[in-house]
């Protein structure tokens, strides 16, 4: 296994990418770190200052929807000011240029923005990511089947000011998969199919500790595919990786693409 971004290691990674018939790209919040999106774990990670069980569980939402909406409103506002970085753009180019699918744990929408920028008005759908954990910019009703996009600032002054369903008036919730909740079965099945069918998995900016996302690169590997990891820190997947590019996504990915 290679663990340094010297030219030999980069050349090997480039070779794997060029030879791959189908690429599966798994991202975590590290891809967005250089855009200013806070990560969850690590020194400045959100889970250092906030407790997931108070903010990111269905129980927390039932107990105190105002507090939970306040937190998601803050994150929505913060992420709205962020732009995709050269790492997002390089991944979008991979997905636009060849058979590839981006599957992300991120809820920040930046892969989609990058896809539209790279496509420059042409069809960007092939670089549209499968969002495993939902989106900060989507909501769904706690009572009826309503769901939709929502980019508005959140007024979390009190219970009455929180976002409500345009169809039945009940409380809306962020369309995010919280701890203790199952992933959308259709989305999960599509992710497992991509992982099985790909002959290269490029895994970028995830600590690879949250399941089932963390197991997807193993599926590619067990099916005979290669794994390239891009992360400045080692993770539980580093030992599995055929090439570990230990650096920042915004630097390493454009170099991988020959920029
Ligand atoms: P983490 O915060 O757990 O991990 C971020 C990873 O990104 C770490 O391994 C960092 O070393 C790496 N990283 C930091 N900066 C980087 C950079 N510039 N380039 C490349 N890598 C960098 O975030 P996730 O793995 O995304 O779930 O977390 C997984 C899930 O846990 C999230 O989707 C979220 C969270 O709780 C839910 O909210 C359901």
Image (cartoon, rainbow, N blue to C red):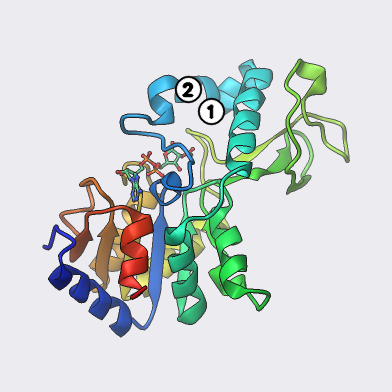
At mark 2, the secondary structure is helix
Spatial CA span between label 2 and label 1: 6 Å
Q: Can residue 6 be seen in this snapshot?
A: yes
Residue 234 lies, in percent from the top left, at 20, 47
In the shown orientation, is residue 117 left or right of residue 172?
left
Q: Can residue 218 be seen in this snapshot?
A: no
Q: Quadrant of ligand 1?
A: top left
**Closer to the camera in the image, 18 or 179:** 18
User: Contact (CB < 8 A) between labels 2 and 1?
Assistant: yes
Q: Quadrant of residue 143?
A: top right
In the shown orientation, is residue 180 left or right of residue 141?
left
Residue 224 lies, in percent from the top left, at 23, 74
What residue is rendered at 62% in x and 71% in y? 125
Q: Is residue 183 above or below residue 77?
A: below
In the shown orientation, is residue 152 left or right of residue 90?
right
Q: Which mark is residue 57?
A: 1
In the shown orientation, is residue 33 left or right of residue 166?
left
Q: Is residue 168 above or below residue 25?
A: above
What residue is rendered at 59% in x and 60% in y? 112
Q: Give neighbour class at mark 1: few <14, some 14-19, many 20+ (Cα, 10 Å).
A: some
At mark 1, the secondary structure is loop
């Amino acid at each position: 296994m290679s663990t340094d971004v010297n030219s030999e290691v980069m050349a090997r990674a480039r070779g794997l990418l060029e030879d791959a018939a189908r690429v599966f790209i798994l991202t975590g919040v590290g891809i967005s770190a250089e855009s200013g999106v806070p990560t969850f774990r690590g020194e400045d990670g959100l889970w250092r200052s906030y407790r997931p069980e108070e903010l990111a569980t269905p129980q927390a939402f039932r107990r105190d929807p105002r507090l939970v909406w306040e937190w998601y409103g803050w994150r929505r506002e913060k992420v709205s000011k962020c732009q995709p970085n050269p790492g997002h753009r390089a991944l979008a180019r991979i997905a636009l240029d060849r058979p590839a699918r981006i599957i992300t744990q991120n809820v920040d929408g930046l892969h989609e923005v990058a896809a539209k920028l790279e496509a420059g008005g042409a069809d960007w759908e092939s670089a549209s990511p499968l969002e495993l954990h939902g989106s900060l910019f989507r909501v769904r009703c706690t009572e009826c089947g309503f769901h939709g996009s929502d980019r508005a600032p959140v007024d979390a002054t009190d219970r009455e000011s929180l976002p409500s369903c345009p169809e039945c008036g009940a409380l809306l919730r962020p369309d995010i998969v919280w701890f203790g909740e199952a992933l959308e079965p259709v989305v999960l099945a599509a992710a497992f199919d991509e992982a099985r069918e790909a002959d290269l998995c490029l895994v970028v900016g995830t600590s690879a500790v949250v399941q089932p996302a963390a197991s997807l690169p193993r599926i590619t590997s067990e099916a005979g595919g290669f794994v390239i990891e891009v992360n400045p820190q080692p993770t539980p997947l580093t030992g599995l990786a055929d090439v570990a590019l230990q650096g920042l996504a915004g630097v390493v990915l454009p170099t991988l693409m020959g920029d």
